[in-house]
Amino acid sequence: MLKYTLSTLNRLQDLVKESGYILRYEKGSFKSGYCVLQDKKILVVNKYFETEARITCLLEILPLLQINKSDLSEANRKFLERISQSELILENPESNSNAA
């Protein structure tokens, strides 16, 4: 489980940057709090969001991105795998409780 701290936000930002995307915090009227410009590899997150909301947005965005794991550092690759496992647990709690 990820902690919603500034350290986690920094790690997510580093992962996004290393994946070749540009992350910007801007004001705007995004319904979901963020906007992904795939062609230009730019992510725009509402700048008025607090740390927890920024982390939540980045966690929602990550599955939408085309990330080449071979381009990532070992630390970011492990972090991405950890995030992916956390998302699987959150998405399908029924199957995880049956597995125990």
Image (cartoon, helix red, strand yellow):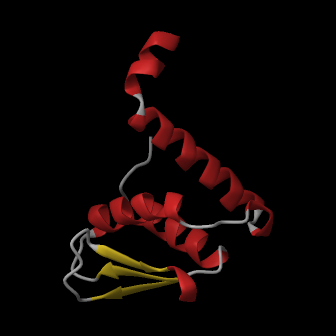
Please indicate whether residue 76 sits to the left or right of residue 30 in the image: right
In the image, farthest residue toward the right: 70
50 sits to left or right of 43: left
Q: Specify whether 46 is left or right of 44.
A: left
Q: Assign the N terminus to one quadrant of the image.
A: top left
The image position of residue 71, as x and y in percent, is: 78, 69
Frontmost residue, 63 versus 26: 63
Give the number of callouts: 0
At a point 56% along the width and 85% down the height, the residue shown is 39
Seen at 19% across and 83% down, the residue is 29
Whether residue 25 is visible here, answered yes or no, is yes
Residue 49 placed where, x, y %? 24, 74
Q: Quadrant of residue 68?
A: bottom right
x, y percentage for residue 76? 67, 61
Q: Nearer the viewer, residue 56 or 3?
A: 56
Residue in the picture at 62% in, 67% down = 66
From this view, report whether residue 3 is shown above or below residue 88.
below
Residue 41 visible from this viewpoint: no
Give the residue drawn at x 40%, y 59%.
60
**Who is closer to the viewer here, 64 or 20?**
64
Residue 32: horizontal and vertical position, in percent?
A: 25, 68
